[in-house]
Amino acid sequence: MTMITIDCCGMRCPMPLLKAKLQYSTLQSGESFCLVADDPAAGPDIERWATRVGAQFRIQSHEPLTVEISKAQGDAT
């Protein structure tokens, strides 16, 4: 399966967070996507949201911020 990358460079919060939420809602258990953003507020906002919903969040790069977000195995939400 090809990983989807969402390019949010040039977008200011809350757009990267909203795009992350929208893409996450389409994932099946065990699937993931990558999000790229250059707004400094995006990282902390997305990380807090991911923690709250139980998503796996892994930073791949800091400039620009590149994160992989995964829906946990067995998570049906």
Image (cartoon, rainbow, N blue to C red):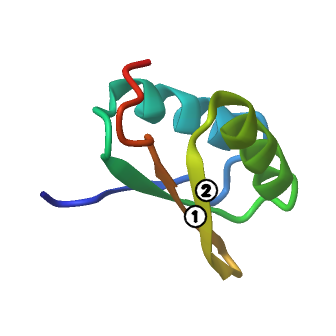
Asked whether residue 12 is in view, the answer is: no
Residue 2 coordinates in the image, percent (x, y): 17, 60
Horizontal side, residue 35 vs residue 37: left or right: left
Residue 50 coordinates in the image, percent (x, y): 67, 41
Q: Residues within 10 Å of mark 1 (few under 14, many from 20)?
A: many
Which amino acid does the dot numbered 2 rest on?
Phe
Q: Earlier in the sequence, mark 1 or mark 2?
A: 2
Q: Which residue is mark 1?
A: 67
Number of marks drawn: 2
Give the structural element (helix, strand or loop) at label 1: strand
Residue sitting at x 72%, y 65%: 38
Horizontal side, residue 40 vs residue 17: left or right: right
Q: Which residue is mark 2?
A: 57
Q: Residues within 10 Å of mark 2 (few under 14, many from 20)?
A: some
Q: Residue furthest left?
A: 1
Q: CA distance from mark 1 to mark 2?
A: 7 Å
- Quadrant containing the N terminus in the rendered view: bottom left
Q: Residue furthest front?
A: 74
Which amino acid does the dot numbered 1 rest on?
Val
Which residue is at the front of the view, 23 or 15?
23
Residue sitting at x 77%, y 57%: 43
* Above or below: residue 60 compared with residue 54: below
* Above or below: residue 40 compared with residue 64: above
Asked whether residue 5 is in view, the answer is: yes
Horizontal side, residue 9 vs residue 48: left or right: left
* Above or below: residue 26 compared with residue 11: above
